[in-house]
Each structure stands twice: as structure tokens, then as C-alpha cells.
Image (cartoon, rainbow, N blue to C red):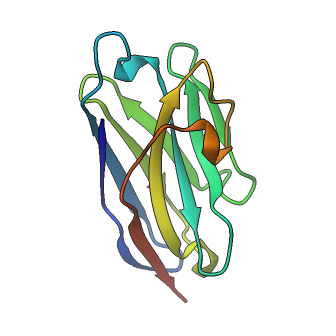
């Protein structure tokens, strides 16, 4: 299984970026549709923070951290095995390396990193004031 991220970069405060995570390599018995998907971020000197996840694609159970609620939106295109993080109204404190992750929807409850089995390589997001 491979998760490939794209879309990071530099933005000004108040601006927007969209991150994408393309998933491949899932089997018929462990398909993309069975996965919970999420986005995490890690700033220098801080722990990895879960910011948004879809724990169940069928009933669209979605979790957002308070720090991004109302500004970030997670979505999934199941026809493309790709999920996204739309980030609006960016703030300098959003600066971090962002990671996408996937894990069984039977296991993942939300923002706990160890519940996820697969991780992207990380992409830098820098927000200037």
C-alpha cells in the first residue's frame, strides 16, 4: 500500500491550499472503501496532531480538531482512491509537515496515530503572516 501526497507549499495568511493523497495497492479483501482516512500534522518540537479524518466512508463519520474546525474540509473520491484536505483561511500556526494516513475503519476511532496502518511521506505547508 502506498499513499502519495501532493499540494503542499507556501501560502499567505488568509489564503488556501488543497492537499491530495492518492492511495494505491489495496487488495480486494482490504479495499480503499474499507479504510478510514485522515490528515495529521507535525510542527517542529510538537507532537503529531490529528486534524481531520473520515472514520467511516459509508456513513460519512468525520472528525475535525478544534484548531481547524470551520476552516479545513476533508473529503474522499472513492472512484479515484484519493482523499483531500481543503485548507482555507490559513494561519501562521498552521505551518507544519502534513501527513495523510489510512487504516481499517474497524480500528480507527479518530485522531490517534497508532490506529493508522499506512502513511504518506509528508508535505510541508508554510503560512506566512
- Residue 9 location in percent, x, y? 35, 74
**In screen coordinates, is 5 left or right of 17?**
left
- Residue 106 location in percent, x, y? 60, 18
Q: Nearer the viewer, residue 86 or 22?
A: 22
Quadrant position of the N terminus in the picture: top left
Quadrant position of the C terminus in the picture: bottom right
Q: Nearer the viewer, residue 14 or 11?
A: 11
Instruction: Name the residue at the right extreme.
Output: 66
Q: How many marks?
A: 0
- Residue 26 location in percent, x, y? 29, 25
**In screen coordinates, is 50 left or right of 73?**
right
Instruction: Name the residue at the top extreme.
Output: 29
Residue at the image position 54 percent from the left and 70 percent from the top: 90
Residue at the image position 38 percent from the left and 52 percent from the top: 120
Q: Nearer the viewer, residue 6 or 106?
A: 106
Vertical arrangement, residue 14 with respect to residue 51, above or below: below
Task: Place residue 112 in its image quadrant.
Answer: top right
Vertical arrangement, residue 31 with respect to residue 37, above or below: above
**In screen coordinates, is 112 left or right of 86?**
right
Residue at the image position 58 percent from the left and 72 percent from the top: 94
Vertical arrangement, residue 57 with respect to residue 91, above or below: above
Task: Place residue 89 in its image quadrant.
Answer: bottom right
- Residue 27 location in percent, x, y? 28, 18
Q: Nearer the viewer, residue 56 or 122?
A: 122
Amino acid at each position: 500500500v502506498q499513499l502519495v501526497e501532493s499540494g503542499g507549499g507556501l501560502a499567505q495568511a488568509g489564503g488556501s491550499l488543497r492537499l491530495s493523497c492518492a492511495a494505491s495497492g489495496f487488495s480486494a479483501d482490504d479495499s480503499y472503501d474499507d479504510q478510514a482516512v485522515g490528515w495529521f500534522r507535525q510542527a517542529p518540537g510538537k507532537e503529531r496532531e490529528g486534524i481531520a479524518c473520515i472514520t467511516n466512508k459509508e456513513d460519512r463519520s468525520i472528525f475535525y480538531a478544534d484548531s481547524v474546525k470551520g476552516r479545513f474540509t476533508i473529503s474522499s473520491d472513492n472512484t479515484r482512491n484519493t482523499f483531500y484536505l481543503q485548507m482555507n483561511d490559513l494561519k501562521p500556526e498552521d505551518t507544519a509537515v502534513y501527513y495523510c494516513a489510512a487504516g481499517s475503519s474497524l480500528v480507527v476511532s479518530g485522531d490517534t496515530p497508532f490506529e493508522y496502518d499506512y502513511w504518506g511521506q509528508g508535505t510541508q505547508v508554510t503560512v506566512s503572516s
